[in-house]
Image (spheres, grey):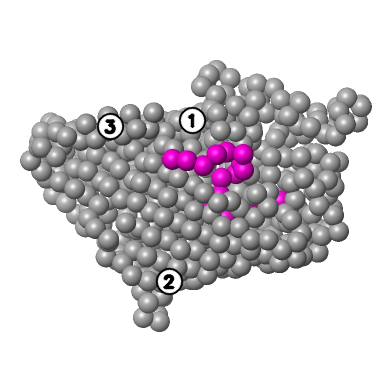
Amino acid sequence: MIRSLLLVFFVCLAPVFAARPQSNVSLARESGHAEDTPALTHDTDRKPAPEGNQKAADRAEPNGEQPRAMFAHILADRVWISGQANFIFQAHGPFHSPYQGTNSLIGTGETASSRVLTLYTGVKLPHYTEFIFDLEETGGGGLSQALGLAAFPNLDVVRNPTIGQGVYISRMMLHQTIPLPGERAEVGSTPFSLASSIPVRRLELRAGKMSMVDFFDVNAIGTDSHLQFSNWAIDNNGAYDYAADTRGYTYGAILEYQSPRFGARFGEALMPKVANGIDLEWNLTVARAENFELEFRPAWFKGSATDIRPIAYLNHANMGSYAAAIQSWKAGLDPVPDVTRSRRQGTLKQGFGLNIEQELPAHLRAFFRTGWNEGRHESFAYTEINNTLSIGMDLEGDGWNRKYDRVGSAIVSSGLSRDHRNYLADGGLGFLLGDGRLNYGREFISESYYNAHIWREIYAAAQLSIAVNPGYNRDRGPAVIPGLRGHIDF
């Protein structure tokens, strides 16, 4: 199937290479929008809107400069081709662990490594339209098969160890921009938005296969496991149970409005058939996810950007109830509490979040996230967190003559609802957690990194994470988790 799609894709590119390259203004005239294409402006204070999550952030330096690329990513002014390779090695030694269960972080020492390889392709089509097609391959795994920690320290690992390796389609979507009257701004092209200039006021529509967190809950400081933090609940809002299969992708549509100081986006997406499952439910009458996010960019501090993003979501899915699972177990119907036996199609789960980032003097940036979801029904698509609070910052290396280096530090505190913690305490298993018993305490995890620029777009990083109360269990831990990361963009 993938070979056939690639063949179709490159056949579609043939007219592009044959066509004479045209400027953006020429394309506007061709599509009948020349009157909406005024002179370009240089938006030096801020980019008008985030254009993607971790892969776009790979190329977003705080000082606006970028290392020299391996080769040009835009061909014939129409086609984007690039790639990346990310490798993470992590380990931990023995830690205090009087007991452990099926889904525990192993108390003895262990090591793990992972890789993610991505090919990004895209083509500019007439009438402000783009087609994005990405392939991905993952390998290796996480510590304890990515079990035992709600805020797991490696975002790159697949959350289901039973999923086989191999190349798969990660993104396949159409991106349509509808210009609104006003100026245009020069921006850097990214794998998710190929234009080098965009209307400052615009509507955007995306439809197809995507990751919701490429566009929702984006944060310039804590969002990119390739060059920044790698923890699940630092790079994303841990309480945002966003629609995704176990690899992190779904099919959906996003409608977005952007202006210099305000933005809004709404997304509808498919949910997995089962918690942490690879298969998506296509019947929207029984399962789907609504996502709504606002963006405010107030001019509070001259020359220092402020971004405030509240988010809300509502999931409809075949979810179980923790309280019902406990009740069935106490009634003798089940040998242990099993939330999967209480699933009901069309069950609702809602959540809210707040995402703030702030530029500070001396090349310092800080972020804050908090989130909550109702914890009566099972965690379904992301991780087992019902409320979260994280704070962190990064600093670029200009002060020590290493302008492409970056150092960062963050901490996240995660918690469970009463129903969820009672379920785990009684011996229930979630799709990530389950020590067999539970002496509940909030899970605290810190992460620090130094990301060093080696040459062009090659980076190496050292990481250190400390997990207190792993899996919300005060009887276990703390676990000290050092790590190394290598990253290449090409």
Name the secondary structure under disc 3. Answer: helix
- Residue 425 at x, y percent in the picture: 84, 44
C-alpha span from label 1 to label 2: 37 Å
Q: Residue at x 44, y 38 (%)?
A: 168
The overriding secondary structure of the stretch rendered in magenta is: loop
Q: In the image, which disc is placed on residue 7?
A: 3
Where's the C terminus, which quadrant?
bottom left
Magenta stretch: give its range.
148-167
C-alpha span from label 3 to label 1: 27 Å
Q: Residue at x 55, y 29 (%)?
A: 279
Point out the frontmost of discs 2 and 3. Answer: 3
**Numbered disc total:** 3
Question: Does residue 234 show up magenta in the picture?
Answer: no
Give the amino acid type for the residue marked by disc 2 in the picture: Ala
Give the amino acid type for the residue marked by disc 3 in the picture: Leu
Q: In the image, which disc is placed on residue 452?
A: 2
Whether residue 424 is situated above or below residue 268 in the rendered picture: below
Name the secondary structure under disc 1. Answer: strand
Q: Visible in this render: residue 172?
A: yes
Question: Does residue 160 show up magenta in the picture?
Answer: yes
Q: Earlier in the sequence, mark 3 or mark 1?
A: 3
